[in-house]
Amino acid sequence: MRESDCVVVMGSNMAENHPVAFRWPMAAKVEHGAKLIHVDPRFTRTSAVADIYAPVRAGSDIAFLGGLVNYVINSERWNRDPFFRSWVVNYTNAATLISDQYQDAEDRDGVFSGLMEYKAGVPEWPYNGFTQQYENASWQYAGTRVGDQGRTAATAQSGETPGTKSGMGTPGAPQPSGPPYDALVRSLLKPPAARDETLQNPRCVFQVVKRHFSRYTPEMVERASGCPRDTFLKVAETILANSGADRTTSFAYAVAWTQHTNGVQIIGCCALLQLLLGNFGRPGAGIMALRGHASIQGSTDVPTLYHSIHGYMAHPTALKKHDTLEDYLAAETVPTGYWGNMPKFVVSYLKSMYGDTATVENGFGYDWHPKIFGDHSHLPMFVAMNEGKVRGMFCIGQNPATSLNAKLERAAMRKLEWLVVKDNWVHETANFWKTAPEIQSGEVSPADIKTEVFFFPAAQVAETEGTFTNTQRMMQTHYKAAEAPGDCRTDVWFTYQLGKRLKKLYADSQAPRDQGFRNLTFDFEHEDPKERQIGEPSAVKLLKEMNGYQTADPSRHLAGFGELKDDGSTTCASWIYSGVFPAPDRNLAASKQPDPPGQPGAHLNWGFAWPANRRLLYNRASADPSGKPWSERKKWVWWDGSKWTGYDVPDFAGTKAPSAQPKPGGIGLDALSGTDAFIMKGDGVGWLYVPTGLVDGPLPTQYEPAESPIRNPLYKQQSSPVFKYWKQDGNPLASVADPNFPYVITTYRLTEHYLSGAMSRWLPALTELMPELFIEISPELAQEKGIANLDRVRISTPRGQIRAKALVTRRIRPLQIDGRTLHQVGMPWHWGYEGVVKGEIVNELTALVGDPNVTIHEGKAFVCNVEKG
Amino acid sequence: MELSRRDLLRLSVAGGTGTALGGLIASGVDLAPVVAEAQQLRIKDAKVTPSVCPFCSVGCATLVHTINGQIVNIEGDPRSPHNEGTLCPKGAATFQLHINPNRPIQVLHRAAGATDWEVWDLNRAMDRVAELAKKTRDETFVERLANGKLVNATTGIFSLGGATLDIEWNHIHQKLMRGLGIIAIENQARI
């Protein structure tokens, strides 16, 4: 971001929540006059240092971003500057024609073609949260089908909604088997999609996009978001002026884009804008996801998430044709682009699970691997728990007693037979049976809670050796500096010791269903006798299993995922992490050599950024189609006549010339040309229009959140027709423009606290800095409601009511929406009923509502009432 | 060693260059030279171990100072291209995650219907958890759905994890869970 000429922070308060990273946009501002723009419902410390602050209504992000798309496409500069035309024609799917069956939301008042009643799912799992679904056949490219394989949203991966089946092989013909699986992959090839490089055909992506956003005018942006049109236009002009061959703009967002009724489409809309502007794969460009946890990227890469297995491969599911390994590969492999190598990743993963017992004959143990059969994520699991369908729970570093619709989640936990909490402190979840509000009020008696509860105290970071993967995909090692006190143990210790005990308990089982577990390889004994004695597993062996090694000689680590094979001769849990540990004495995550000052700053010898230590993804796009840098100022990776070179590890086949043509009948990278910079996409280009993978539409569309004080100003369709909602006692929603809940409420985080407070409300320094819960209210609303600064106020939603201290501040301002005044309020949510400082739980107010693609909740835009008292 | 809350604050003034110093400067008092000298004394002869901040995802590198195996200070690593030695208030308070009078160090067990915790032996608790996990798995395991599809899975056990845990934990934990057929595995990344 230090290289950016303009940084747009939207969906984030970067100055307060990622303060150390915020030094880099500030450096860009100070060092070369970069513009800083903050788009947010609240005026924060980020706004205070911004060149432009644009206030918006929480929940109107797509109206705002769609307005930027419309502005750019119709601007004189964008249509004149050859850079944009060249970028968009060569590096995006702008020229691709789409099916004539497709009908846009513009033509159907906010609904795309293919909407139908929800039919997917199985009776064993009625918790998917859908009432309607889309069939995406009409969204496909004309004359071909991209299929619905892999790399899609969680819902599509798990098969909760059926995508279009790709035209694989001949119907009824037996699947080619393997290994090698090249014939199977080749059988999946489809003819390339038709294109119109003049971008004039009304069915080409560019024209469809242009028409879709044509009503997102500055006037409409003002109506929907409350942002004055002059301010909006200043934002639009600044972004466009700072994009092009020698200038780049970057966006930064955080959970204020993800925690929405349709958050995925907000991020998609930003990607669409950045693709139109040529802001990908280039220094100072891109979209920065400012993630909130030391290894949250790692926990997505190494998925302690239900919907995927290592390295973003779909979890085998009973809702798709995944019956055998061949079926799974045929359904999930994209034959063209780098994902054409997926059989190698899957087989090497299965070898890491089942070792020698994974053979060609038994499909590498594929049948032992469990299959999912619905949405088993956080929200539906608590719904199932509340119905008594979940009996035991491991809760390791999480605090759900303060989580979404908190009272409902605590009620669900009371139905558990057992609960294991492993954490730093005896927090709200550990004590949910003892000190929760409903216990204190006498509504529930501990004697009636039959849950057996365990608390295991945790070792801390400086007492543990391990690796974090940060938001930049960078893996960094931390070492053990001291012994943990008492019975505090590392997280790996707990899981390893549990696994060893279970291995013993199942050692003699002859039941067929236990054979997979009996065959699971699980030997991570520590090298150091002292550590071995306390039962600590070896972090080195765990990292090695992720990096991969030659099956026949485990001392030969893999140098990278290029060495993977689909015949079982390589063992590798995580193909994307392959290369971090290329030799027993070389752990690159431990690299600590920064570049000297004055260098371009890729810092290739500080940590290891997957894949293959690349710092900028799709960086082939930093050169023009002929391989030359777009400009001297923005050079990063280029073609030197015989190979790709530059400041970073090129994200391209190393010696594939810019003029290279796809190989006829080729699979994998052979199917892509020398200008196909987006090597993970089947057609080698960035997608402005998304024909497959999203379940709620191929283009972003302004829908209102599940609860909104206004009617959707753009369409008759109020909210996404497919957002997830669980109708439950205790989970009601306010109706549109409900007079009982007239204000928009948004939630956020403070510099001094961390999430539910489980890593901050027990720390003297932080609690002293920020002791008490508050609600931010504008002076106008405060006056209207007779509330003075520091008064106690009651905040209510259809789910619950809490009290907090009023902070009357001009940081929150009323907006003019469609001719009337709309008030917003804001609350941080770090408090609970345990800890050094206590306060009410803001999540008593939230609802179980989920994004249709990924089931992330709505926590940023819902409605409430505020009263003094 | 018992430390009061005030002691801890004082300790972190000496130890953490981030919060305490930043806060004092913000209030208009320049204590930088004093703090710098105090810090020099505090970490003199200490062993230095490289580490990483456990809070947000920026990945600020830290240095952990220990004397005789006791952590005495945690501060930003000046070599890091991310943070160049700086830390935010939370990062600067990492020390208090470790050295903190509120820190529980015993295993606790609450029996069904009980009104209070009981301290348990670590191994006894682990044995009991393993026994419960096996029992619940065995009683809720589904080999095939009603439609005949092979799933070899159970939704009777839910695993919910945080996202400030090592990738090594994520790996071993998802491996154990999936190995057992436990498919409802989630973490903070969904929130």
Image (tube, grey):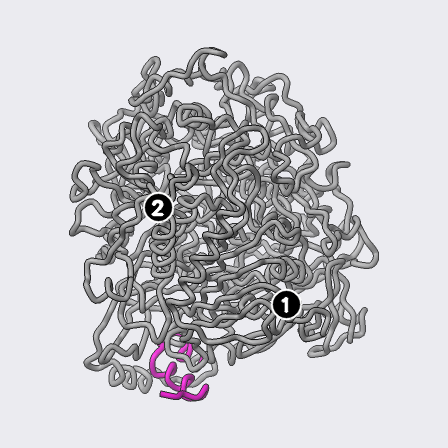
Answer left or right for A628 relative to A728: left
Is residue B13 within the magenta segment? yes
The chain letter for the residue carrying disc 2 is A
Instruction: Check disc 2: other Cα within 10 Å, few if <14, some if 14-19, many if 20+.
Output: few
Residue B55: percent from left, percent from top: 43, 64
The image quadrant of residue B163 is bottom left
The chain letter for the residue carrying disc 1 is A
Disc 2 and disc 1: Cα gap in Å? 48 Å
Of the numbered discs 2 and 1, the one sitting upstream in the chain is 2
Q: Nearer the viewer, residue A107 or A453?
A: A453
* Residues rendered magenta in the picture: B1-23
As shown in the figure, which amino acid type bears the numbered disc 1? Answer: Ile
As shown in the figure, which amino acid type bears the numbered disc 2? Answer: Asp
The residue identified by callout 1 is A841
Most common SS among magenta residues: helix
Residue B136: percent from left, percent from top: 51, 51
The residue identified by callout 2 is A508
Q: Is residue A277 above or below residue A683?
A: below
Residue at the location (74% across, 50% down)?
A708
Q: Nearer the viewer, residue A826 or A32?
A: A826
Instruction: Check disc 1: other Cα within 10 Å, few if <14, some if 14-19, many if 20+.
Output: many
